[in-house]
Amino acid sequence: MVKLFAMSVLYKGPNDSTLLKSAFELQSFGYFQRKSVQEFMGFVTKTIVERTATAARQSVKEKEYMCHVYVRADNLAGVLISDDEYPHRVAHTLLTKTLDEFSAKVPSHSWPKLNETQVTFNELNVMLAKYQNPKEADAMTRIQQDLDDTKIILHNTIEAVLERGEKLDDLVAKSEGLSMQSKAFYKTAKKTNACCRM
Amino acid sequence: MDLDDNFPAAKRIITEIQNIVNSDSKLKEFDLVIQPESQNKSPVIYVDHCLGLESWCVRHVYEYVYQRLISIRKRLKRQVSNDTIPLLTSALLINPEVLTFWNMRRELILDGCLKPDDELQFSAVVLSFKPKCAEIFTYRRWIFFNILKDFSSNHVILNELTIGLTAAAGYPSNYNAWNHCYWFIQKSLEQENYSLISHQWEQTKTWCSEHVSDHSCMQYRQRLLKCLVADKKCLQHLECCTSKSLMRFFNSDERHKLMRPSEDYFDEAIGVALDELYFNEDLIVMYQNHESLWNHRRFLCYLLLDIYNIDCIKEALMNNERRVSTKLSRSNELYVKKHVLWLQTALCIPIKLL
């Protein structure tokens, strides 16, 4: 499926990251799964930003999903979760554009102090809807050309992004952002070896 | 008959499910809700036309209904009774892959205990939970073929095609769903209704561009395309700009050879195939390295030569494929090589990469 599921803007502090804004499009998931899927995507977003170096790009594949991360030199970070059919280049182009627009709207000195409730940036929802069709990104060729010089690190699982000695299972168990139900959902999904089907 | 009754709540749960199924004609989804332990309340969740069952009780409920249904089925004299309906409903929602249970529902339809329209609605809900389950599709076709026996209404068949497409979106490469759609297309063609095939041709085009690695969808389009090029009547409802593709594919000399007034249909059919070839090219450019797209391309090349095996088409195809292969050789290296090799060996097209 060519699909964008979630797009988020975060600030990467020295120890952890704070979510500044996020948008989701989860209609393709079952009604009863959406809440857990959303929580889990939020969890993955935060985890991966914290494990991406400043001024770096990464793409992480996990089953049929892709998670694209871009942390800028000024520690503003963008994460896009898509299906793996969605063109990777377009995803990174989109991240660049999103962060550009965000920093134009929200002044950089306020980023370290803000949290999600204090930020108004509804353009994120608009962009998530608009760029479901990657053809819309054709107009962003300039950014795309800049991208060609940047290296994108590609990982084949989430586990590969984690630091030595870390385990995804432990992180899920410790996470405060995940409800009991989502943790159970994660365990079941893992057991049946399918991300969101049972 | 001894049936263990170690989960007394089961009867209440299946009655509750049956009541929801009966009362809500707009019920759209069923799913299991992960909940490892009983929360001391009913495990049946019903919100916003969606029905959920908490996972902790699934095993007990299923054991309860399964034992009872099998013992009913084993009796020599099978008596149909309305009491079996709630058992069947829960059993099939949880596990729709048991053909015996669907057969019991078939008998209930024949006896007039179940209404075919309600059954279409119920099986659509089951499909939302298991979108690939072949038994559900067979059951629906059985209702259409044996009970309703009416394929003339576009409205009904369009609804069925929508259900097929929704199921296809719920499970990748869902051949059963596409097969279901194709069955209805065939039925409509038998009725000499040629508008639906055009409708599907247009609709799945968008669908394909949103699911570029779904080869079942492309295979469905291949079957549609075969119908379109084989019968002139199938083309009459098609809205497409085939002439553009013809202009693009053939140079003016070649066009002159092709454009004989007596054979205008020939042009139209080849135009549809060429349209698809260009559409496929756009997708390959946008979405790199998807085998399904290249396989689809193979089919299109094969079809063109299979139906119109004349030199001028062969040459135009060779030029076109050389252009495409050269353009894509960097981004799709492996697939381009395979494609060229295949053109050389299978179609005897002496193509050389620049």
Image (cartoon, coloured by chain):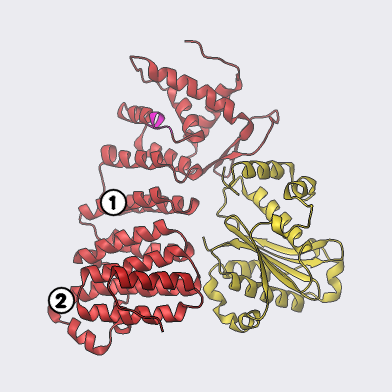
Chain colours: A yellow, B red
Query: From this viewpoint, is residue B244 visible?
Result: no
- Pick whichever, B307 or B32, lies toward us: B307
Distance between mark 1 and mark 2 Cα atoms: 33 Å
What percent of the width, then of the height, locates residue B237?
27, 67
Q: Mark 2 points at which residue?
A: B263
Say which amino acid is labelled 2. Answer: Glu
SS of the residue at dot 1?
Answer: loop
| Most common SS among magenta residues | helix
- Relative to B296, say whether B122 is above or below: above
Is label 1 or label 2 in front?
2
Q: In this view, does A143 lie to the left or right of A121?
A: left
Q: Give the range drawn in magenta.
A: B98-102
- Relative to B144, say whether B162 is above or below: below
- Pick whichever, A23 or B2, lies toward us: B2
Say which amino acid is labelled 1. Answer: Ser
Query: From this viewpoint, is residue B62 visible?
Result: yes
Q: Residue B153 carries which label?
A: 1
Q: Which chain carries label 1?
A: B
Residue at image location 39% in from the left, 17% down from the top: B74
Q: Are marks 1 and 2 in contact (CB under 8 Å)?
A: no
- Relative to B315, say whether B93 is above or below: above
